[in-house]
Image (cartoon, helix red, strand yellow):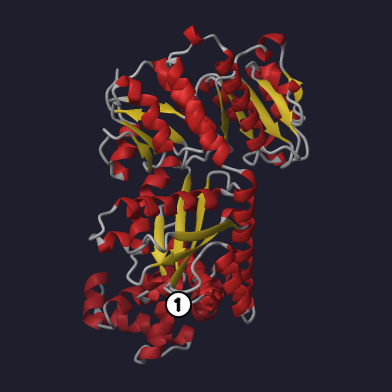
Amino acid sequence: MHVDHLLTIEGLGITLVWGDEHLMSREIAGVTATDLEDPTRFLEPGEIVLSGLVWWRPDDGRARADRFVAALRAGGAVALLAGEETHGAVPGELVDACRAHRVALLSVPARTSFRAVTEAVYLRQWGDLSRRPAPHHALPENVRGQLSRLLELGAGPAELLESAFAHLGTPACHLLTSSGRTVARTSSAPALPAPEAARRLHGATGTTLRVQADATAYDAWHLHLGEQDAAPPRVLHEIAEVLAQHRHRHGGGDVARERARAHDALIALIALADTAAPDADALAEAVRSCGLPGEGAYRVVVAAPEGGGRHPEAGRDLLAEALRHLRAAAASAPVSASATSALFTAASAYFALAPRPGGEAVAVVHTGADDELPERLREVWPLLHACRPDAVPHAGVSARVTGPAELGRALVQARYALAGAKATAPGAARVTAVDDLSTLEALLAGVPDDVRAAYRSSTLGPLLKESKASYGMLLETLEVFLGNNGSWARTAKALHLHVNTVHYRIQRVEALTGRDLSRLDHKLDLRAALFCR
């Protein structure tokens, strides 16, 4: 399939913005959808790139567009398909950049989903492959026939993988996501912990091939064989194409859309219950509509990656893969390993998940009575961060609640814990549970910035109006004094001052703030204000 064929696919409405005859005749090897400003490391030569242009703003000018298109050229992309929905049209700066770097530019109307474009490309490629004479295939004709039948019957990745490699003696092969989750493996392949699987994907040993299907940075599929020469390259490509077809067929459809609508409705209802008296019957019905049990324990998780373009569904993509990791781990755990499998039991492996504005996502997780959800999320969080180093992931986890009517309260807890995670570690991947808020500093970290600023100003206000040198000196003395439990001698020693100087400075603080530092409540007031800086 060539780039110019995209203009002829009925129903997509793709139009040419810029590209000469040579560029339009280049062959398409795959599709990648991205809104990273520098997607180079996720590209394979010969791919077309779908982008909603979330990374670009009108005031960015030409420089950012140049960097993006230069990255596409460096990664071997054959064309850029720019979505019109974000900006209403393809920016002129992007057109100029594509012309300068000689990358074909096509426009995708707002009514056309990127999934529809991806499916059309792979359906066309699979049809082209199937119509070629048998000698042009690396897979034997009987194997191709068997895989086609399995696809039609709705077979899963494990069955497809086993059947595809059977004629080669079933070498050890894993189908892994970018974050190291095992989707499927051949019968000869050992189970791999997610950290080891992620390490192998980026290691120098074995063979790894990405399955070119509509996916996120977190859950893209990769075929990985531990032995370099276990299968001919063309065989791997054909098997990858079969798996791509499977993913396209099962990644959407009416059932998936109906499930997404049910999840959206539940999360919206929970958010409403946060601000008004919850409708217990409506919440219970919404929970059941999502396939979750109506009884038992629940937790709410709120996640949001910072940076990375803040794609509207970034939080959903991140949290969905994290929860799939936990479900996969529970499914593969021995029955006796209750500490591992209590989170998702065979009867309660359920969660509902929906994106929220600003890249945030909210999930309702039905758990066992002794779940370790925060601990399990912390284990996979670094693997997810490694998939998008430019987008630092944070998450907040509520305490367990015992029924749908309490989910609104759980959402408040999870959002507060998320704010705490962002405040205490803005540049580091962090999962914070509301149960972790066991100190005054941790508790205050989740308070909104404007509230923290107002409290700091009202409590330390007179000190903040002092000259810079005096302000710093008095605040330092106050902080050391409170950190040493009000000990004059230890404070003087720590600051290399005479104890009388410490007394004088503390008296100045008391006079300026109206607090009496011999009283515990006034000490706590000032301590809290210092934590709010």
Residue with the mark numbered 1:
402
What's the residue at 56%, 42% (across, down)?
Answer: 251
What's the residue at 45%, 68% (across, down)?
Answer: 299
Q: Residues within 10 Å of mark 1 (few under 14, many from 20)?
A: some
- Identify which residue, 25 or 479, lies in the foreground: 25
- The amino acid at mark 1 is Thr
Q: Quadrant of residue 138?
A: top left
Asked whether, in this view, residue 527 is left or right of residue 254, the answer is left
- Identify which residue, 456 or 172, lies in the foreground: 172
Quadrant that contains the N terminus: top right
Residue 208 seen in render: no
Residue 250 seen in render: yes
Q: Quadrant of residue 17?
A: top right
Q: Position of residue 286 (x, y in %)?
A: 60, 68
Number of numbered discs present? 1
What's the residue at 60%, 43% (across, down)?
Answer: 252
Q: Position of residue 42 (x, y in %)?
A: 48, 31
- Identify which residue, 37 or 60, lies in the foreground: 37
Question: Where 395 falls versus 445 (above or below)?
Answer: above
- Identify which residue, 74 or 500, lies in the foreground: 74
Asked whether, in this view, residue 96 is left or right of residue 310, the answer is right
What's the residue at 32%, 20% (across, down)?
Answer: 168
- Mark 1 secondary-structure assignment: loop
Q: Position of residue 161 (x, y in %)?
A: 39, 31
Question: Where 455 falls versus 390 (above or below)?
Answer: below
Question: Where 176 falls versus 467 (above or below)?
Answer: above
